[in-house]
Image: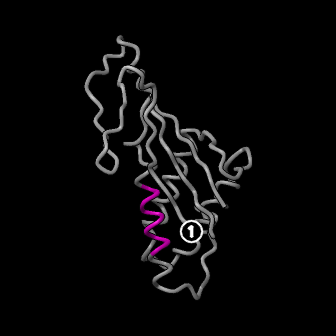
Amino acid sequence: MGLDIYLSKKTFIGAMFKSCGITGEIRLFKRGKKIPINLDRVSYVIEDIYHGSKTHWLHHWLEMELPEVLGNAEDQEISKGLMDRLHQACVDVLAHRNMTDFREVCKEKLHCDLKPDLSDEALNSFLDEVEELARATSPSEKTDDAVFLISASW
C-alpha cells in the first residue's frame, strides 16, 4: 500500500447552454457496450492528467506549498499559480539531472531529499515521475475554463 497522488483538470464546457456553441456527439464504449451520454447535459469534462504512485516527495511538496492540509481522498482545488510553481520546479530539476548540483536542486525546488545510495532504477523512476508531472502542469494544459484538482489516497 502506498501513497497515490492524482491531478485532475476540470473544464467547464456548458454544452447544455446553446450559447456556448458546443456541438458534436459523444460516443463512448466500455467493454464493447455503448455508454449513453447526452451532450446537451454535459457541464464539465474531468481529465485525470497525472497519477503518481508512492509519490511521498510530491505529497511533502504539497504539504509545504498548500495553504490547507491535503486530506485522504478529498479533492482540493489548486491555483494556477501553484501549478506554475510546480511546473517550474519540475523543469528546473530536469534541467539539472546530469549536473553535480542535481540533489541540491531537488531539495530546493521539490523539497525532496534524495538518498546518496539511491539505485539507478529508483532515480530513473523518480525522473520519469518528475517529467510526467512537468507535462501535466505545462502551460498548454491551462485554459480560462479549467480548474485543477489534486487528491491523495493512502
In which quadrant is the N terminus drawn?
Answer: bottom right
Residue at image coords 61%, 66%: 57
Identity of the residue furthest to the left in this view: 24
Residue at image coords 43%, 38%: 142
Neighbourhood count class around disc 1 (C-alpha, 10 Å): few under 14, some 14–19, many 20 upward: many
Identity of the residue furthest to the top in this view: 19
Frontmost residue, 57 versus 33: 33
**136 horizontally vs 39: left or right:** right
- Residue range (magenta): 125-134
Q: How does the figure colour the protein chain or chains?
A: one colour
Frontmost residue, 70 versus 127: 70
Q: For residue 60, which quarter of the picture? A: bottom right
In which quadrant is the C terminus drawn?
Answer: bottom right
Q: Amino acid at mark 1?
A: Cys
Residue at image coords 70%, 55%: 63
Label 1 secondary element: helix
Q: Position of residue 73 (x, y in %)?
A: 65, 50
Magenta stretch: dominant SS? helix
**72 horizontally vs 54: left or right:** right
Q: Position of residue 97 (x, y in %)?
A: 44, 73
Frontmost residue, 69 versus 127: 69
Give the residue pinned by disc 1. 106
